[in-house]
Image (cartoon, rainbow, N blue to C red):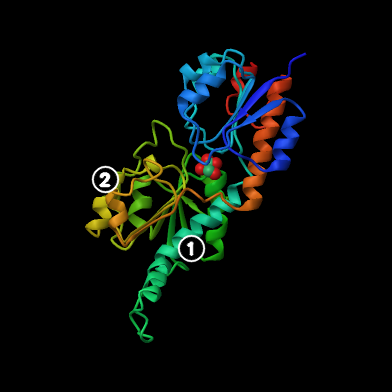
Amino acid sequence: MSRDKVFVTRELPPATLDRLRKHCEVEVWQEFLPPDYEIICGKAGDLAGLLSLLTDRIDPQLMDAGPNLKVISNLAVGYDNIDIPAASQRGIPVGNTPGVLNDTTADFAFALMMAVARRIPEGQRYVQDGKWKTWHPTVLAGQDIFGSTLGIIGSGRIGAAVARRAQGFDMRLLVNSLETEEEIRQLGGEKVDLDFLLTESDFVSLHVPLTDETHHLISERELGLMKPTAILVNTARGSVLDPEALFAALRDGKILAAGLDVTDPEPIPLDDPLLTLDNCLIVPHIASASVATRTKMADMAVDNVIAGLRGERLPTCVNPEVYD
Ligand code: DGY
């Protein structure tokens, strides 16, 4: 009997792949850069499973090219790269990797906040450029984090992990999210509307998924409400922020600085004006990138594939309606 075929769109830890190979025939894309969309479509006809990354666009056309697909498993908690209604329509369960990256990502949101507020990258450049001649009272003076006001937009699992950290910094915590007032109070925060949060916060951290509603959630009007000393951090998805409005706000001093783990598009083109700004720290979508967490994410993604091939419910399924 021929074995199910699964295409894995990037190299994963060897032990994780070995586990998958016990259940199916596995093809792994060996290149550093993602396979082109057409390449995945070309392979789809033979596939029972697809283990994708957030860089792979999985749309209805691709699904139609793979009529035998039993499972799509995304190695990410976010799944805005996949057309979920289309997958559900075709009865294909889609898996993601929630939970394991909450603390790693929350640590990183704080790392960005602290790096920007305390001007750490600028400090490194200052030393490398030979500018460190003496101790000086005003050189590279930044903003305090302790005792400041943090606004969290979206308090799902990652937002809640950021809220827990904020308590250790004695921060006043404002939260704009769908959770109830009581749930937010339990996080040590106060449920507020978006405009109030933007007006009051010294730091704003984004933790919403990318949907039609959150696309450009923070644009010119919202940035205009923020304090000129405020710092904005994005570890969610690039297009939750309007990049042109952000550039103008940073350039014109409407807000003090930003720390971005995610951009729109990704990777950010080298001629993007945001890269010309000293008050914008940009890193390449690495908030969940600890060795331990990325290994757990790979394991979860493989668990979803194995369950899908067996016709079992995916342990972490984003479209459970396929089982109705
Ligand atoms: C995710 O999982 O969605 C992150 O953006 C990458 O870890």
Q: Which residue is mark 1?
A: 171
Residue furthest to the bottom: 134
Q: Position of residue 229 (x, y in %)?
A: 32, 63
Q: Report the Cα–Cα distance between label 1 and label 2.
A: 30 Å
Label whose residue precedes the other's in the sequence (1 or 2): 1
Label 1 Cα neighbours within 10 Å, binned few <14 / some 14-19 / many ≥20: many
Image quadrant where residue 19 sits: top right
Up/down of 31 relative to 7, above or below: below
In the image, 92 versus 130, the foreground residue is: 130
Residue 217 marker: none
Q: Position of residue 177 (x, y in %)?
A: 47, 42
Mark 1 element type: loop
For this view, does 211 lie left or right of residue 220? right
Up/down of 223 relative to 14, above or below: below
Q: Position of residue 239 (x, y in %)?
A: 37, 40
**In this view of the protein, can residue 103 be seen by the observer?**
yes
Instruction: Look at 70% across and 36% down and name the residue there.
Output: 17
In the image, 139 versus 57, the foreground residue is: 57
Residue furthest to the left: 252
User: Residue type at mark 1?
Assistant: Met
Q: Nearer the viewer, mark 1 or mark 2?
A: 2
Q: Which residue is mark 2?
A: 244
Instruction: Look at 74% across and 15% down and name the residue there.
Output: 2
